[in-house]
Amino acid sequence: MTKNRLEAFSDGVFAIAITLLVIELQPPDLEPGETLAHGLWLEWPSYVAYLVSFLTIGVIWLNHHRVFTQVAQVDGPLLVLNLNLLLWTALIPFPTAVVADFLAQGGEPARTAVAVYSAVYVVMGASFGGLFVWITHDDRLLQRLPPPEVVRAARLRFTLGLAVYLLAMALYYAFDQASVPADRPG
Amino acid sequence: MTKNRLEAFSDGVFAIAITLLVIELQPPDLEPGETLAHGLWLEWPSYVAYLVSFLTIGVIWLNHHRVFTQVAQVDGPLLVLNLNLLLWTALIPFPTAVVADFLAQGGEPARTAVAVYSAVYVVMGASFGGLFVWITHDDRLLQRLPPPEVVRAARLRFTLGLAVYLLAMALYYAFDQASVPADRPG
Amino acid sequence: MTKNRLEAFSDGVFAIAITLLVIELQPPDLEPGETLAHGLWLEWPSYVAYLVSFLTIGVIWLNHHRVFTQVAQVDGPLLVLNLNLLLWTALIPFPTAVVADFLAQGGEPARTAVAVYSAVYVVMGASFGGLFVWITHDDRLLQRLPPPEVVRAARLRFTLGLAVYLLAMALYYAFDQASVPADRPG
Amino acid sequence: MTKNRLEAFSDGVFAIAITLLVIELQPPDLEPGETLAHGLWLEWPSYVAYLVSFLTIGVIWLNHHRVFTQVAQVDGPLLVLNLNLLLWTALIPFPTAVVADFLAQGGEPARTAVAVYSAVYVVMGASFGGLFVWITHDDRLLQRLPPPEVVRAARLRFTLGLAVYLLAMALYYAFDQASVPADRPG
């Protein structure tokens, strides 16, 4: 497996996943007397989800490229780890659609939708982390290994990023639980 | 980030966005006694929208290529500006579907659909303008900077194009408002 | 515009159009007591349409490549003619879906569906013919112009292919009209 | 036809087919009082189908690349055999959707869905086998033909793989038939 074909295939999947996001955006079904402007406005969670997911896949693509410029040779585990990253990236349109459909409802559906969305992002981040750890675990794959402290710093950033993400999720749920009694005072 | 991979990724997004337009075209649901020919005929706004959007993305792709032949090196802001252009280009199938669904109804839905469609195009044009301004703002990025008067002329064309576009939209709405009294004479 | 990027973009559109055909194939909605095997069987026009459209786009891709190996330089009209060919090729999933939905009904819907399908193919064939004529109309574009009699023979084959196609359509309709009295003897 | 363009086109189809799998995953329609978590849970056959199909297409892509590194020159039959492989690979999202829709129902729909899914996989495996046999049938296509015993071993593995697959299907149906009397004791 040459590096070029691996990069081309990965770019293809990134480009398709980022462009497929748009098919979750559907013209609204208007109720009698409803204006189209109002119907489109009610779809705001879809626009937010489109934007966030687009930027996320864009950033994955940038990082993927940055990491692979350092790779000299492709081996079996790298192929598998890369395929694993693509699996979770290509999945993003699904949690995006779930959030778009249920975020505005509030309550359990909104909570679950955000949890699913977050979970896919955490797993995707972990997949990228795994890929990065494998690439930097010795110099066999690297044209020139960056200084160890650079590698350690980059790994730390990955871990911190995931930690912040998990913390944000935990806070969201703690806040959400705290607000439940207020919702059901009786 | 090499220029080659940036161009390949952008081409991928353009090619997918232009080909995805077709999924807005759906076989009609016929009412009892309706001929398929009539059902297909009623979908004419879809065909117009497909054609206009196809040509637009095709022209973006051509211009993108023309601009990037001048780029010698890719930097961070260029990446971000390019991702921004892709975001609006990949979005085009959505306003296309909105126009296809609501143009034939007339009234508020048609007006709003055209406004949404136009707004996405204006933002996309502005995104392309931003990319172009960044590329031509000094000679760092250019293999050979065209003479200043050529750059000024090209920037002027962009600005004029946007101005004409906004004017057309304003006229459309002025005309539309003027015709409202005729619609509701009472 | 380099020839490489034109070919890569065209290949992208061909690859996406050929792969998008599958989204017209949907799991059937079963009626109570209906077996899935029966429900799938009733979808046979979809499978035929998938197969025919897949082979058609595959052949277009092969011919496109064969023609472009002869092209030395890309000019403006060639870009426009190529975009025109892509427009009709990317449209193919739509008439494919129309045929898949209405072929089994017989009568006017089947006739109209086949007519739409055929019309898109004829226009696509004509678009390819136009591209071919432009490429061979002088030696400016060709690395080595094939002998004039080869070019004439190829042009003749194109024209004949279209003629046979139009004849087949005409026969189909003549036959169809002839069978109408038999259908409505009263 | 150069080998490069054949590989690029095939990679495009693989990348699109693998990314299109996600559009079979749809947010659930919740019944009154149903939680989103429950609705998502009921879609587990979709997730299994997504995973299996993703891995399958990923493996096809890897094998395709491995085989083509050995190919020195592309001829007509190879083009046709490759297009045949792409046809069945691009079809995979359809049986994936059928399995996702009907697996959880059990009974005839589940059996038929699995049979359709398996059948597409067997035909796809056979298509790949045919491609491989053609590539290894003489040294015209190979840069360096592997030793005959390696080729024989590889062909044997292909045949064994298909045999195991067919056996698994046969066992599944034998088991399924055997369990029918238990289902309907009366």
Image (cartoon, coloured by chain):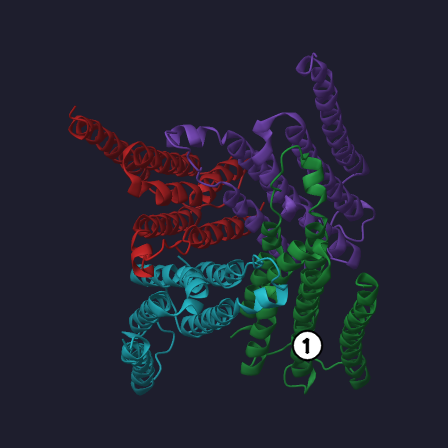
Chain colours: A purple, B red, C cyan, D green
> Measured along the vertical axis of the image, is residue B129 above or below residue D123?
above
Check disc 1: other Cα within 10 Å, few if <14, some if 14-19, many if 20+.
some
Provide the chain ID for the residue under circle 1: D
Q: Position of residue A134 (x, y in %)?
A: 80, 48
The location of residue D62, given as percent across then percent down, is 70, 64
Element on which disc 1 rests:
helix
Q: Give the residue at x 29% y 61%.
A: C77
Q: Is residue D41 left or right of residue B69?
A: right
Residue found at x 30% / y 33%:
B111
Quadrant for residue C30, please give it.
Answer: bottom right
Query: Can you identify the residue that label 1 sits on?
Result: D126
Asked if residue A30 shows in the view, the reply is yes
Quadrant of the image containing the C terminus of chain B: top left
Please state if C88 lies on the left or on the right of A125 as rendered: left
Task: Please tell me in which quadrant of the rendered image residue B106 appears.
Answer: top left
Residue A71 seen: no
